[in-house]
Image (cartoon, helix red, strand yellow):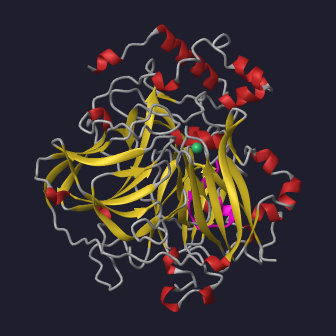
Amino acid sequence: MRILKYHLSKKLLAGLKVRTELSKAGLSRRDLLKLGASAGGAALLLSAVRWPGISIGGNEIMSPPTDPWREALPIPPVLRSIDPSSGYFNPPPNPYAHQYYTKFPPQKYYFMKVQARLHSFHPQLSKSTIWGFNGTFPGPTIHARYGEPILLRIMNDLPSLADHRGFGLPEVITHLHNAHTAAESDGGPWNWTQRGEYTDHHYLQARAGFTVPETIPPEFRDLSGGDVRETLTTLFFHYHRPDVTAEGVYKGLVGFYLNFDECDTGEEEDLSASAWRLPSGSYDIPLILADKRFDPRTGELFFDTTDLDGVLGDKMTVNGKIQPYLYVKRRKYRFRLLDGGPARFYKVVLRHEGRSYPFTQITHSGNFLERPRRDLMSLEIQVAERSDIVIDFSQFQSGDQVYLANILPMKDGRQPDRDKQLNPDDDDNQLVQFRIEGDAYDPSRIPDFFRPFPPVVLKEVARRRLWRFERGNGLWQINAERFDADLDHRAENLDNPRHQIRRNTAEIWTLENRSGGWEHPVHIHLEEAQVLRINGKDLLNDPKTRQRTDMYRLGANTKIELFMRFRDFPDPNFTRGRIGERTRYVMHCHNTTHEDHAMMVTWNLVPPT
Ligand SMILES: [Cu+2]
């Protein structure tokens, strides 16, 4: 049946041709809009007269057919720390370039190169050029521990701008989502590197609150003075070059960063009293879900730079392979799901012979839930969200085949079609095939309670802010403005930033989407928030709906109120650079197409008055 779908009409070929030419010329729709100067000019540039074929949606272009379950699921290797006296750190990191460097001197040093490589997504497709950390998609996984500060050097080894072809820009800046990190290490949308240059990221591996230990009850205070209730778990790092983040992440620049701690020790046989003993080692597997599209003429990775809604793929990749399989034992596994975007939302189910089976959710977007959600039959995950789930395969028999499938349809990148459901037993909608093979000893456990969320102290609230996410001037805006890194980086703005938040205060932020036509998965750098209300409905006071997260589901016609605490940064002893530079963070839509066009805003965490 697949072959029937694989017919390339003249119209489709014209659509492909124009997109390939635009991509080769390095032109995005945003560039075209800029070139057009006026709305009328832009419309003309994008008109069917000027570009026959542009009226074909990129989402109508069908990838070549592929058979599912041909290759094993790749599991990204764990990155090894290296000796800081080795050549990788010559010249050595500059201690004066980082906030709190002497308080948290690095104990682990890591080095990665960003490289272009040929990558096979599927044996029936030709290889594609990807960009990867150490040349792989996904990049290596970093295992981090609280109390062990990290220095990560990332070298740009991509082709130079002059040699670059295709989509994305070979200018690298890397954000660790959603670490509690100084501005200069956050990897925000500035200061990207060219070929041969590197960025040093200093990750404190300290919990929020470490500068105000006196405010934290002793039973929750860790050795650095931070609040144990601020512990983060499954994070990821990714390319954050403004205007082209979607393209670079789609091209492969993403990897996992897993925090371990005294409870989530990464050892299921840990007999210490604090250890939770979650499934660990080879039973703890990160899964990045990323839909891709391939040029039907060449079989190579294809990105539609003209799609403003959000690019969707018609091939489901997990850890860089289209529809891989994984042999599993009849025991519990921890899977760390990451929606790698650029725009697709998923609702996953566990299927076997026409029935759904239960699993347990233990984390949401970098935070342990207070209590595990057991016996879940489905789970939604939006772009950049992470959900760690535990699947107990002892409910199946050896020889069974079990599928992780997606049932949430999307016609375009604007929003999912929540009134409909995809067929989870159609292999087009299946992501991974689990092949049950034999028994294994299982000492792992899932505790009934993880740890409490930090308190919401409304008397700390110094200010409320309203952020409206909306369409405007043909692009995506926040409070009627588009992000522009150059404008943002002007001296006057760096000396007197626009949105100043005082350290050691709390604020209530309202995120608002008045449109019925779009959904925005919103991300705020640096701080986690707790959701107070959605459309006026209280979430905080019901243990079932309480949420601590770094991603906010700004659905159609939705208003979300968040409680946020801002502590620790900037370092009062750090005076390097302009105030705007050492204090800046961003909030943006993580539908990365919306982010690039240009739904992002800078805010600054400034010293107390
Ligand atoms: Cu959006």
Residue 64 found in image quarter: top left
Tell me if residue 91 can be seen. no
Residue 85 location, quadrant: bottom right
Residue 263: tell me if it is visible: yes
**Residue shown at 62% from the left, 55% from the top:** 511
Instruction: Compare residues 505 and 63 and report the one nearer the observer.
Output: 505
What residue span does the magenta drawing correspond to? 171-186
**What residue appears at the point 60 percent right and 68 percent down from the top-left corner?**
563
Q: Position of residue 597 (x, y in %)?
A: 66, 38
- State the residue at coordinates (80%, 68%): 576
Decide: is 459 above or below 592. Answer: below
Which of the 4 image quarters holds residue 286? bottom left
Q: Is residue 373 left or right of residue 551?
A: left
Q: Was residue 174 drawn as part of the magenta stretch in this picture? A: yes
Q: Work out whether residue 492 or residue 540 is closer to the camera in this orientation and state it.
A: 540
Task: Find out whether residue 60 is within the magenta segment.
Answer: no
- For residue 331, side relative to residue 158 (left or right): left
Quarter of the image containing the N terminus?
top left
From this viewpoint, which residue is outermost toward the top?
Answer: 10
Q: Residue furthest front?
A: 536
The location of residue 510, given as percent across then percent down, is 63, 59
Place of residue 579 in the rendered image (x, y in percent of width and height, measured from the top left): 82, 65
Q: Is residue 589 above or below residue 39?
A: below
Identify the residue shown where x is 52% and y is 74%: 230
Relative vertical location of residue 554 with respect to residue 224 in this rendering, above or below:
above
